[in-house]
């Protein structure tokens, strides 16, 4: 009897679930529009492309694109300079202060064009979409607020192991040390 009552509600809840839409390739005019960022004269900050806003800022809110950005971060050796967000020869992403700005346009321009303090330009190696994916991932490294989507993140930068990765202890069952 209970199953008959609960089953319609369960079916209704499942019908409301939606999958995340993946776009494996953008149309060429859309991708060309993503490269049209307006940057302030000092090279920091600006306005994202109209196409980016019209698409709903997909590279900030889509788990697939964030995961692709993570993959690119590893593939292009970003960990060599930035470690896993903690900094090395390049600046840290976890400290909350970014010299060239933490907004998406500033990060995009830094990746595409490089910076004078040692950041190489990757615009000739990556497509515009890949730069936006990498931008979205870099933003999640230093994010202090919750996102609606997140990449599958490693635990390299934790100060202590996750609770589910901590070594097992027997607690009170261990004999006292002498």
Image: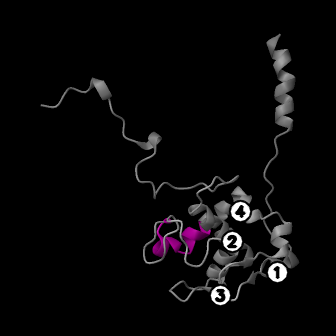
Q: Main secondary structure of the magenta part?
A: helix
Marks 4 and 2 close (CB-CB < 8 Å): yes
The colour scheme applied to this rendered structure is: one colour
Within 10 Å of disc 1 (Cα), the crowding (few <14, some 14-19, many 20+) is some
Within 10 Å of disc 2 (Cα), the crowding (few <14, some 14-19, many 20+) is many
Q: Secondary structure at mark 2?
A: helix
Is residue 136 rendered magenta in the image? no
Please say whether residue 18 is visible from this viewpoint.
Answer: yes
What is the magenta range? 71-85
Is residue 81 rendered magenta in the image? yes
- Which residue is outermost to the top? 1
Q: Which residue matches tag 1?
A: 32
Within 10 Å of disc 3 (Cα), the crowding (few <14, some 14-19, many 20+) is few
Task: Please tell me which of labels 2 and 1 falls first in the chain.
Answer: 1
Within 10 Å of disc 4 (Cα), the crowding (few <14, some 14-19, many 20+) is many
Q: Which residue matches tag 2?
A: 104
Q: Nearer the viewer, residue 4 or 177?
A: 177
Instruction: State how far apart marks 4 and 1 are (Cα).
Output: 19 Å
Task: Please tell me which of labels 1 and 3 falls first in the chain.
Answer: 1
Q: Which mark is residue 20?
A: none
Q: Which residue matches tag 4?
A: 60
Query: How far across and down, in percent of the image, does residue 114 sit?
Result: 60, 85
Instruction: State how far apart marks 2 and 1 are (Cα).
Output: 17 Å
Q: Secondary structure at mark 3?
A: loop
Instruction: State how far apart marks 4 and 2 are (Cα).
Output: 9 Å
Q: Which mark is residue 42?
A: 3
Task: Please tell me which of labels 4 and 3 falls first in the chain.
Answer: 3
Task: Please tell me which of labels 3 and 2 falls first in the chain.
Answer: 3
């Amino acid at each position: 009897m209970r199953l008959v009552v609960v089953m319609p509600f369960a079916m209704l809840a499942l019908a409301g679930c939606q999958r995340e839409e993946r776009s494996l390739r953008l149309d060429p005019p859309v991708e060309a529009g993503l490269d049209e960022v307006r940057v302030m004269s000092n090279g920091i900050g600006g306005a994202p492309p109209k196409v980016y806003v019209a698409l709903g800022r997909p590279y900030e809110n889509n788990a697939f694109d964030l995961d692709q950005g993570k993959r690119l971060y590893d593939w292009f050796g970003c960990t060599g300079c930035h470690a896993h967000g903690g900094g090395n020869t390049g600046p840290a992403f976890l400290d909350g202060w970014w010299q060239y700005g933490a907004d998406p346009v500033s990060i995009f321009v830094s990746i595409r064009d490089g910076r004078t303090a040692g950041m190489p330009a990757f615009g000739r190696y990556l497509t515009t979409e890949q730069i936006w994916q990498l931008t979205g991932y870099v933003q999640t490294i230093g994010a202090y607020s919750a996102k609606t989507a997140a990449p599958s993140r490693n635990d390299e930068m934790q100060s202590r192991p996750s609770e589910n990765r901590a070594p097992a202890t027997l607690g009170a069952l261990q004999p006292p040390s002498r």
